Amino acid sequence: MNDNHALCATSEWADHLHREVLGSLLSELALGDEMLEVGPGPGAATEWLRKRVRRLVAIEVDPEAAQRLATRYTASNVEVVTGDASRLAFDDASFDSVGTFTMLHHLPTATLQNQVLKEAWRVLRPAGILVGSDSLGCTDLHDFHEGDTYNPIEPASLIARLQTIGFDHVMVSVGYDVRFVARKPDGELSQCES
């Protein structure tokens, strides 16, 4: 990542994420006991999330960022794992919820984004939820990511992408960013399917 991403480690960014994104997106959702956070980076969302679940596992691909986060959350309910979210080393149905916040645009292709979303579906328990947010494509963010990977999600395709993976009850909201919530089916047929 380029030097502009130092912003993501500031208290101002964490405050913005907590107030403007997480609070409004997650206020009505039950995250369950065990949550997986995909791509926490410096942990701007981690502090907020860990207060809402019994156990939070954060998977970070960057070893240095993972080590800093692990040190920060020693002896807490946060477990930090260094790894690739497109090939999760967790068993099927391991988590009640999976969250990813301002991370998916760092993946170079839609195929890789889909693979991360497929892995999220795999590790979710039945009726588990996927929740996330990401930036919308714009010139300013393209410039901000100069020399870095920047592949913003196309909001119009996100519902179909999540449904194709197997999620249901998909909601996508577009404002100054894109936010999404989707559920892994619980195995029971809906009224329309019976």
Image (cartoon, rainbow, N blue to C red):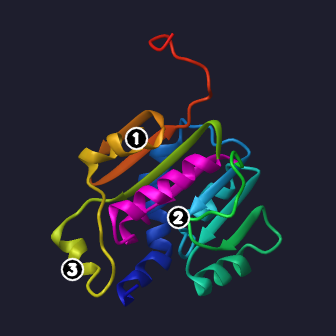
The residue stretch that appears in magenta: 95-123
Q: In this view, does 121 lie above or below 9?
A: above
User: What whole-number distance in Å separates the C-alpha atoms at marks 1 and 2?
Assistant: 17 Å
Identify which residue, 163 or 40, lies in the foreground: 163
* Labels 2, 3: front one: 2
Residue 102 image position (x, y, % from top left)? 42, 64
Is residue 93 left or right of 27 when viewed as pictured? right
Secondary structure of the residue carrying tag 3 is helix
Q: Is residue 114 part of the magenta span, yes or no?
A: yes
Three-letter amino acid code of the residue under disc 2: Ser
| Residue 162 among magenta residues | no
Q: Using a 10 Å C-alpha cutoff, classify the residue at mark 2 as few (fewer than 14 neighbours), some (14 to 19) or many (20 or more).
A: some
Residue 73 in the image: x percent, y percent? 73, 72
Whether residue 128 is situated above or below residue 72 in the rendered picture: above
**Amino acid type, residue under disc 3 in the picture:** Asp
Residue type for callout 1: Thr
Earlier in the chain: of badge 2 and badge 3, it is 2
Q: What element carries label 1?
A: helix
CA separation in Å, label 2 and label 3: 27 Å
Q: Is residue 105 left or right of residue 156?
A: right
Residue 1, placed above or below residue 89:
below
* Separation of marks 3 and 1 at Cα, in angstroms: 32 Å
* Residue located beneath label 3 in the image: 143
In front of the other: label 3 or label 1?
A: 1
Q: In the image, what residue occupies the spot 29% across and 80% down?
A: 145
Using a 10 Å C-alpha cutoff, classify the residue at mark 3 as few (fewer than 14 neighbours), some (14 to 19) or many (20 or more): few
Q: Residue 164 carries which label?
A: 1
Residue 102, can we see it? Answer: no
Q: Is residue 151 visible?
A: yes
Sequence-wise first label, 3 or 1 = 3
Q: Mark 2 points at which residue?
A: 86
